Amino acid sequence: MKKTALIYWGKGGNVEESAKIIYGQFSPESIDLFALDEFDVNNLKKYDLVILGGSTVGAENWEDASNDNKWNEFFRTVQKMDLSGLTVAAFGLGNQVLYPEHFVDGLGIFHEEIAKTKARIIGAWPTEGYHFTNSDGVHDGKFYGLALDGDNEPEKTEERAKKWVAQLKQEM
Ligand SMILES: Cc1cc2nc3c(=O)[nH]c(=O)nc-3n(C[C@H](O)[C@H](O)[C@H](O)COP(=O)(O)O)c2cc1C
């Protein structure tokens, strides 16, 4: 059986809530859910699919590699590993109303970092139904992964998660 790891950060807000909704789209025996601070990167290769989830909290948090962002720390570690053979997908929380010029920019950074590991990346997601003007998380008219707006459209998360997970299962 194919096994999935769902790893999210941070805790206690929209990211965690969305992670649990995505987790709920899998049968419990096929998926393990971790907050990033409880996941051992040496276990990555035990999984067929790894789903990473985070939020966009402003570029400065990402681009300064010396900064103590948990995802930066994670990617610095995994870049030394050869993850060819692993499949990775990402979801990102953002806010279209307050940050229409930078909606889910973090998905772009996830994509850039994952691409360095040679892992196969799946889960590109259509931009239809969202309202924003610009995003580093979009390429060729699609988000690099599932975009969610828990601040303005929490009622859409479950439906989006359901469709995205069905798509991931197909792409696997
Ligand atoms: C300081 C700050 C900066 C943010 N910058 C962006 C941004 O550039 N783009 C975006 O789409 N959302 C941005 N957001 C919105 C968050 O991504 C959104 O509120 C998300 O749901 C937060 O996840 P959390 O509740 O798990 O912390 C920002 C939020 C904060 C507090």
Image (tube, rainbow, N blue to C red):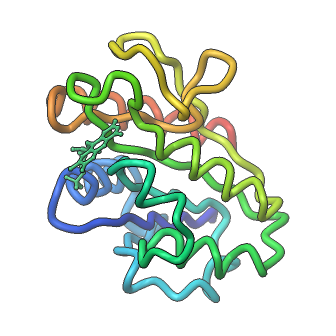
- The spot of residue 154 in percent (x, y) is 16, 33
Horizontally, residue 25 falls left or right of residue 85, namely: left
Q: Residue at point 47% right, 20% down?
A: 134
Q: Position of residue 41 (x, y in %)?
A: 59, 84
In this rendering, would 34 be left or right of 121? Answer: left
Please tell me whether residue 114 is drawn above or below residue 144 in the rendered image. below
Name the residue at 78% across, 79% down: 81
Compared across the picture, whether 131 is left or right of 108 comes to left
Where is residue 64 shown, x and y percent of the image?
52, 65
Compared with residue 39, is residue 21 higher up or lower down, i.e. above or below?
above
- Nearest the viewer among 27 and 168 is 168
Quadrant observed for ligand 1 in the rendered image: top left
**Is the N terminus in the top left, top right, bottom left or bottom right quadrant?**
bottom right
Please identify the quarter of the rendering in which residue 116 is found.
Answer: bottom right
Q: Residue at position x 25%, y 35% from top?
A: 158
Identify the image quadrant of residue 148: top left
